[in-house]
Image: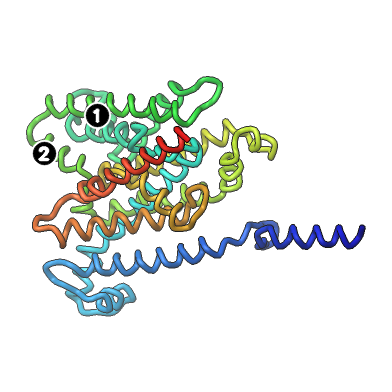
Amino acid sequence: MTRALEADDTSSAVAGRPAFRLGPLSTVRRPARVIVAIALAAALFLVFCLNVGRGDYPLSIPDVVQVLLGGGSRIERFVVMDLRLPRALTGVLVGAALAVSGALMQSITRNVLASPDILGITSGASVAAISLIVLSGTSTAVGVFATLGLTIAALVGGLLTAAAVYLLSWRGGVQGMRLVLVGIAVNAMMVALIGWMLVNADITDVTRAQLWLTGTLSGATWSQVWPVTAAVVVLGAASVGMSFRLTAMRLGPDTARSLGVNVQKSQAVLLVISVALAAIATSVAGPIGFVALAAPQIAVRLTRSAEPPLIASALTGALVVVGADLVARTVLPVELPVGIVTSVMGGPFLLYLLVRVNRKATI
């Protein structure tokens, strides 16, 4: 009997994943995720340096690294630190914020089609930002709204849109497909509202708004880097801190409750984090499409995990945005906004996800 129990203990230890403990904290070792994360970080660094180095004053990757480490000539430091680094860093941070936002939303709803741009969150943030651009000063209310700044305006717009989608989807709980359908309807209304504002706006404001709506990193400055940096650090750390609740919720509401997780409260907090990340990223660079949808699913396939991993998703999103910006600036005959490139890449990926979801539904 004792030998049988020892055999059972041994087999269970072999079958389970090895644990990693550091004081009161413990997690499961996942070597594949660590290897993929390191590979993504290395690829991101190379593409980042290549993006910083390309331009009218070309620099090699070693030259860029030397400047980043404090060396290089005066002109090289000016080109890298003042002209190109803010744009590249903004791309990294915006891509990471959008990807984590999409990963959280897809995990909460357990639906691969759930992302801020599909659910209308990005469009809601865009409505507030466009209001700030084209209507500022036309009334007292809008004038006060304008003083809050583009970041806060987009955050408020995204949160209000998310609340509307959440409440319209509520029927004793939030079901993934219902949330997606309501989000698509709300997104259509937000897009129509943006079109109405542009039709009635001054032509100069329309030009500014149209450039912003395509999603662009051009003209990024250090003042734009800090808000999204704070968002990624604070909200990203908060989402990692809630990873146990997120993992439990991925198993279903009943299992999560049996593990002591307050499902509705956790859903609300994680949705607020997701919306805040998407709204702040949108306020900085405009609505860059399909990154929040595609990056988490690419990370799932790279790590071979069941649900989007947060760190790998963030690195994938950053790599996609920086790579798309590099293509938009250097490969194409005319420089295009980065949002156009990501939309061209993301459209076919959305069709691929729709086909997969349809096949699973019919099996």
What sort of colour scheme is used for the picture?
rainbow
Quadrant of the image containing the N terminus: bottom right
Checking the image for residue 191, the label placed there is 1
Element under disc 1: helix
Q: Residue at x 80, y 59 (%)?
A: 9
Give how far across and how far down residue 180 sits, in percent. Answer: 40, 30
Q: Of 355 and 209, which appears nearest the observer?
A: 355
Q: Nearer the viewer, mark 1 or mark 2?
A: 1
Picture quadrant where residue 146 is located: top left
Q: Residues within 10 Å of mark 2 (few under 14, many from 20)?
A: some
Residue 160 can be seen, yes or no: no
Q: Secondary structure at mark 2?
A: helix
On residue 207, the disc is: 2
- The answer to whether any part of residue 123 appears in the image is yes
Could you tell me residue 305's position as x and y percent? 51, 53
Residue occupying the far right of the picture: 1
Q: Is residue 249 above or below residue 135?
A: below
Please state which amino acid type lies under the numbered disc 1. Val
Q: Nearer the viewer, residue 91 or 71?
A: 91
Please state which amino acid type lies under the numbered disc 2. Answer: Thr
Q: Position of residue 276 (x, y in %)?
A: 41, 40
Q: Is residue 223 left or right of residue 179?
A: left
- Mark 1 surroundings: few (<14), some (14-19) or many (≥20) residues within 10 A: some
